[in-house]
Amino acid sequence: MESRDQRNRQLERASCYSNAGRSQSRSPSVIVIGGGFAGIAAARALHDASFQVVLLESRDRIGGRVCTDYSFGFPVDMGASWLHGVCKENPLAPIIGRLGLPLYRTSGDNSVLYDHDLESYALFDTDGNQVPQDLVTKVGQAFESVLSETDKVRQEHSEDMSILRALDIVFERRPDLRLDGLSYKVLQWYLCRMEGWFAADADTISLRCWDQEELLPGGHGLMVRGYRPVINTLAKGLDICLNHRVTKIARRYNGVKVTVEDGRTFVADAVVVAVPLGVLKSKSIKFEPKLPDWKEDAIADLGVGIENKIALHFEKVFWPNVEFLGVVASTSYECSYFLNLHKATGHPVLVYMPAGQLAQDIEKMSDEAAVNFAFMQLKKILPDASEPIQYLVSHWGTDVNSLGSYSYDLVGKPHSLYERLRIPVDNLFFAGEATSMNYPGSVHGAYSTGLMAAEDCRMRVLERYGELDLFNPAMGEEDVSVPLLISRI
């Protein structure tokens, strides 16, 4: 099994030094900032187009918010873990297919909200009593009907509102849709799952925009062996500098100068900025001259949510053979859910997945306290649960390299902000899931924007060089269609 030290040695490059003193080559040069899927995709495409490319990454690893951990002796994705849209139209499908990486399909439809089918849940109340499956399915269908009613509310109101406010209006108008008792608690659990999809609380999610993302067909597939093989394949042969935190990007008439934390500088013809939205919001990178107001407004007005994972490794399986275990309660904040990795991978692991305010509150705890909190939620539904033998805890909200999990639409803000964030500024090009108008918050969305930024950069730089060949715009190898390996146990 590959160790972290081995991985770092593979990725570190002796050529990571200041461009000062280098003889200036005639071939175009680009600096890519950020080694997540967007940055790696951009760097790969530009490298394959014969550009000089150096990628600067602040972490000691590549992948960004994709993080496959091997501490348990097998892969566990502590960041992104699904391929949303198990189909040939997904731009990542050719790579995953060529690598022979298996997917475990957790949803057979292209639902906006559910990355698992309704029958794959086992829900319990806080006394450990299992909710009858027919009630789980019935309330799930009722919740979908209620969400359909919110579309009428959206059409009748010119001003935006939160999903939570729209739900209140629906229940005021349609008392027949109200639920009580155990059914109401199950409804709150579905609302909790919806908040997990956006990594945000329902009182901050835009009614106008919540369903504007485009969904690829084929449902959702869990990456059984994790995402790391994909990112490593894309990164092969690239000039990657780990532990290089960028602090300043200075645009000049003849290029761009990038400064890292220790004061070293890198110069190039252009820069691809592929850092997370949370990092842009923190203003830890200084732009000189400052970004245009419309760009700064896009950064400020897009939402960034938090969803974390607490992975619990057990000696043996003691839970039902379903994909999701859930705790229903009187508020969505009190609800909980666990992803059952054993169903997909065969390993005895449950992953607790808090989102929104709950995730923020748990991030204030120590890892030990967070694990204990998750285990107590599990004990509510399975009183005889054995203690975990190992655990992993993510901190996407407080990690200075991410400062959030992924983007979402805030109340009152237009969906077009994603596109506005993507638009280049002179020789600065932007990529990342928060620049994807069609696929925000997804790995394939991040990957696609990396390719778009690379092509925009290639066209702009070669136009300036006077070497633009409009008859040869494609970059990289031609994709070969390989069927995806999909299971459903």
Image (cartoon, rainbow, N blue to C red):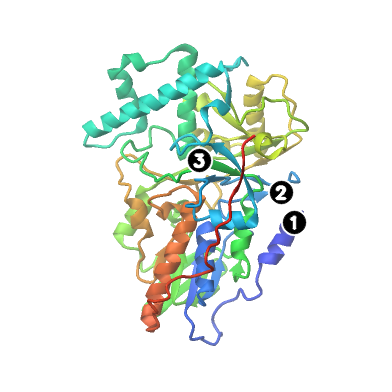
- The residue nearer to you, when weighing 398 against 418, is 418
Examine the image and state in which quarter residue 461 appears: bottom left
Q: CA distance from mark 1 to mark 2?
A: 8 Å
| Residue at which label 1 appears | 2
User: Quick check: can you spot residue 47?
Assistant: yes
Residue receiving disc 2: 70
Instruction: Please identify, in this view, whether the residue under mark 3 or under mark 2 is nearer the observer.
Output: 3
Does dot 3 land on a helix, a strand or a loop?
Answer: loop
What kind of residue is marked 2?
Tyr
Q: Quadrant of residue 347?
A: top right
For disc 3, the neighbor class at 10 Å (few under 14, some 14 to 19, many from 20) is many
* Circle 1/circle 3 CB separation < 8 Å: no
Q: Say if 165 sits above or below 411 in the image.
A: above
Of labels 1 and 3, earlier in sequence is 1
Find the distance from the CA under tag 3 to the CA under tag 2.
27 Å
Asked if one can make out residue 276 in the rendered structure from this viewpoint, the answer is: no
Amino acid type, label 3: Gly
Q: Is residue 411 above or below residue 12?
A: above
Label 3 close to label 2 by CB (< 8 Å): no
Viewer-closest of 455 and 291: 455
The one of 461 and 204 positioned closer to us in this rendering: 461
Q: Earlier in the sequence, mark 1 or mark 2?
A: 1
**Kind of residue sitting beneath label 1:** Glu
Q: Position of residue 425 (x, y in %)?
A: 35, 67
The reply to whether callout 1 and callout 2 are in contact (CB within 8 Å) is: yes
- Farthest top residue in view: 181
Residue 97 in the image, given as x and y percentages of width and height: 60, 54
Q: Quadrant of the C terminus?
A: top right
Residue tagged 3? 219
Work out how far the residue at label 1 is from the one at label 3, CA to CA, in angstroms. 31 Å
At 48% from the left edge and 73% from the top edge, which residue is drawn?
30
How dense is the environment of label 1, judged by Cα within 10 Å: few (below 14), some, or many (20 and up)?
Answer: few
